[in-house]
Image (cartoon, grey):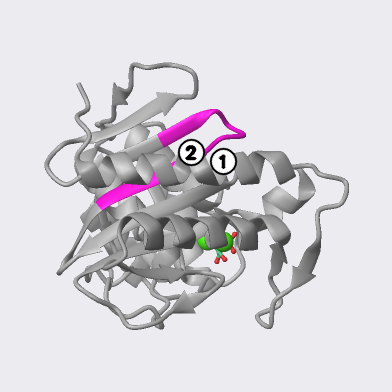
Amino acid sequence: MSQFSVDLEFAQYLADRAQVISLSRFNALDLNVTQKPDLTPVSDADLAVETELRAQIAAHNPDDSVIGEEFGHTSLGERTWIIDPIDGTKNYVRGVPVWATLIALREGGKITVGLVSAPALGRRWWAEIGLGAWVQELGSDSPRRLYVSSVQKIGDASFSFSDQQGWDQSDFEGLRAATWRQRAYGDFWSHVLLAEGAVDVSAEPELALYDYAALLPIVAEAGGEASQFDGTPLPIHDPDIEPSLICSNGSLHQECLKLLKVQT
Ligand code: IPD
Ligand code: CA
Ligand code: CA
């Protein structure tokens, strides 16, 4: 059975607060969408969710700091909540239900709690270091423990990504040609499907800390492996770096890294 620590309980509470806002604005006719300086869209829901989560953290854990996609970060302390209010904003603003609020807690040198809440898909995934990775259907009170797949051969592997933009084409082609099946489930979904054992390799060429922090404990606790394309661990202290991310079921990781090194 999944046991909730105080911090995971709080992360669940934050996700509940987030989904009240995000679900009520999903498909709203008056959703306000603007373009950020990096030319990506942001909606009033992204801003409202992050504002709400920051207010809840300030009220309940005033000594903790926050890194968030929409409002950045100030001084960072020993405990930091890392938030992406809506991962998959391009889906959200077009009415595609694949979007999620991502919540992670960094304590010292580790991400200790990760939670992905996708209310329009009716699912929530979470993990705490040492306590397993779990998924729960909304409305159910019995979470299911997650385990990565046992696929051993790259030729039998299902590979998921977001889109082909931003990839070094030889990296993408290496994974595409070697794997059995390729689907762009996209955003957080590729990686939680990896943790569920439904896909075997998930990758993105460039992500921000708030895009991947919540995913790391979920993948690790499901028995998977996550690294940058060169095999080094994902940085969790510098919010200004934008590393690559490859997750696998562990058995396939070294082979994937070799494929990513092959330059044409
Ligand atoms: C995006 C997702 C996507 C990644 C993009 C991000 P957003 O986040 O994480 O998987 O490929 O680079 O911008 O903007 O929808 O929160
Ligand atoms: Ca994101
Ligand atoms: Ca976002």
Which residue does the image show at 81% across and 44% down from the upper left?
Answer: 28
The image shows residue 78, relative to residue 257, as above or below, that is below
Q: In the structure shown, which secondary structural element does the residue marked by tag 1 occupy? A: helix
Pinpoint residue 89: horizontal percent, then vertical percent. 65, 56
Which residue does the image show at 43% across and 57% down from the upper left?
Answer: 203
Residue type for callout 2: Asp
Which quadrant does the N terminus fall into?
top left
Closer-to-camera residue (151/25): 25
Pinpoint residue 104: horizontal percent, then vertical percent. 34, 56
115 inside magenta stretch: yes
The image shows residue 251, relative to residue 120, as above or below, that is below
User: Callout 2: few (<14), some (14-19), or many (20+) C-alpha neighbours within 10 Å?
Assistant: few
Report the Cα–Cα distance between label 1 and label 2. 5 Å
Q: Which residue is mark 2?
A: 16
Magenta: main secondary structure equals: strand
Q: In the structure shown, which secondary structural element does the residue marked by tag 2 occupy? A: helix
Q: Which residue is mark 1?
A: 19
Pinpoint residue 189: horizontal percent, then vertical percent. 50, 44
Which quadrant does the C terminus fall into?
bottom left
* Residue range corresponding to the magenta coloring: 113-124
